[in-house]
Amino acid sequence: MNLLLVLLALASPQSPATSEGAYARLKPSLFTIEIHSGNREAKSSLGSGYLVSADGLIATNYHVVASFIDDPVRNQLRARGEKGEYPLTLVQFDLIHDIALVRAAGVTGRPLVLADAPPEAGERVISFGNPEGLGMSLIEGNANGFATKGVVPRLLLSMPLNSGMSGGPILNSRDQVVGTNVSVQWLSNSLSFGVPTEALRDLLTRGPLDIAKPALQAEMNRQIEAFEKQTQVTLSRAFQAGSKEPEIVIGGARSRPLPPAFACWDNRQEFEREGVVKSQYGCDLQFTPATEKLGPIGSVQIQIEHFASERSSYGFYGYLPVHAQSHQSVSPRAPGDPDLGPPECASNRVRLGSEVWKITTCAVAFRAVPGFFDIDLVATSLSRPREAMFLSLGFKGFRMPSAIALSRRLLENVSWGTK
């Protein structure tokens, strides 16, 4: 009797599935997603996807189908599965969470079931996808809860995902989808990320899109504007709420703590020949979305530096404008660039509190998204002859009022550590 109970427990759907069994069961529901221009074998981009409804809905990533969304006239979508090749139509997309739905007529696989809750930290999971287009593959690993940085939720995974696996499912031991493959950490060994099923569940409630190019651009603009506003509000509230954490020390400068959504690092360098010591503290807002042509949206990079010189104050301040230019990524554009306008720059002196700053701002406008820019701001303090505070801010895909408000807040956060 005890042996029978053990055998029943082993056969329970709660027990971990073997990789071999999962592959055999799920392969009919897995697909390679391709964007092509009409040639049968050629493709311009490749990812993965999985069936989520009996009428042919397939989930994948937004970035897998992004070039189709940018140009639905020139590009076409298709899926390759165990039983053949299928033309696809775009149904919906979520640029912010990097998820999309496409539909294939005639697919007969079993739809995968979405889990009701995210995976537990440490839970074993498996992931499917087509790495580099070499063939549908299974990867085993662990889910580690949610990443603690950024304003877009991401599952933190210990598994070596590769290019081409984007859009594939992440499953628990009960064959339930707990997430969708989305990205890997650059230069990491096996640190990867997933889109939680909550974002896909929300997308499934939306009606189909008009896939004419102007309508798709309008939907992209709507999502970009909504995310930028959300990011600006989230960061502003975090600044207003303050923090009980100690001040950040950057050489002879200080800063109030930055919002926890930023990933930060610090460094100190001594330039003996020049007689200059540089202390720096840099932060990036993690997991911000990106478009095919315009790049990151709602992205913020912060660099706070303190320079000190025991020698020539003239040579020291002569160096700072050159250093400021190294932090400006806004660059000239070719005439007639269809996506970004020409850079426009302005410099001024601004007093904030007791400090006077020389501030230079450069911006390029998004032609297809009115009111949005890539913006670089560099600010150098002017009150002390042998030391200076330096602040570099990079805003990607931001409205100008939002960037100005956040810049003022960040400048007000920085102060001298000593008199």
Image (cartoon, rainbow, N blue to C red):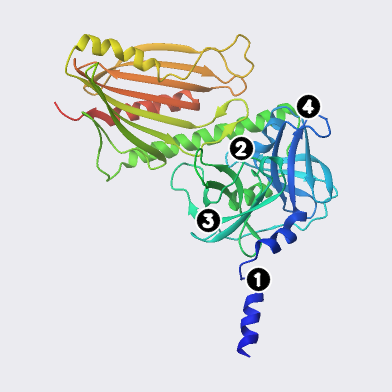
Nearest-to-viewer mark from 1 and 4: 1
Work out how far the residue at label 3 is from the one at label 2, CA to CA, in angstroms. Answer: 24 Å
> Depth check: 349 or 102 in front?
102
**Residue type pointed to by label 3:** Ala
Q: How far apart in space, not on screen, are marks 4 and 2 (Cα)?
A: 20 Å
- Name the spot of residue 240 as percent of width and height, x first: 34, 38
Secondary structure type for disc 1: loop
Q: Is residue 346 left or right of residue 69?
A: left
Distance from Cα at disc 1 to Cα at disc 3:
19 Å
Foreground label between 3 and 2: 3
Question: Can you tell which mark lies on residue 95?
Answer: 2
Query: Which kind of residue does numbered mark 2 sit on?
Result: Leu
- Image x and y of residue 391, in percent: 33, 24
Q: Which mark is residue 73?
A: 4
Q: Could you tell me how far apart the alpha carbons at marks 2 and 1 are, in whole angstroms? A: 35 Å
Marks 2 and 1: which is nearer the front? 1
Q: Quadrant of residue 237?
A: top left
2 or 1: tag closer to the N-terminus = 1
Q: Could you tell me which quadrant the N terminus lies in?
A: bottom right
Task: Compare marks 4 and 3 and give the one earlier in the sequence.
Answer: 4
**Which residue lies under the disc numbered 1?**
13
Q: Local crowd at mark 4 within 10 Å, few (<14), some, or many (≥20)?
A: few
Mark 1 vs 4, N-terminal side: 1
Q: Are marks 2 and 1 in contact (CB under 8 Å)?
A: no
Which residue occupies the foreground of this view, 401 or 299? 299
Q: Using the image, determine if residue 270 lies above or below residue 336.
A: below
Which residue corresponds to mark 3?
143
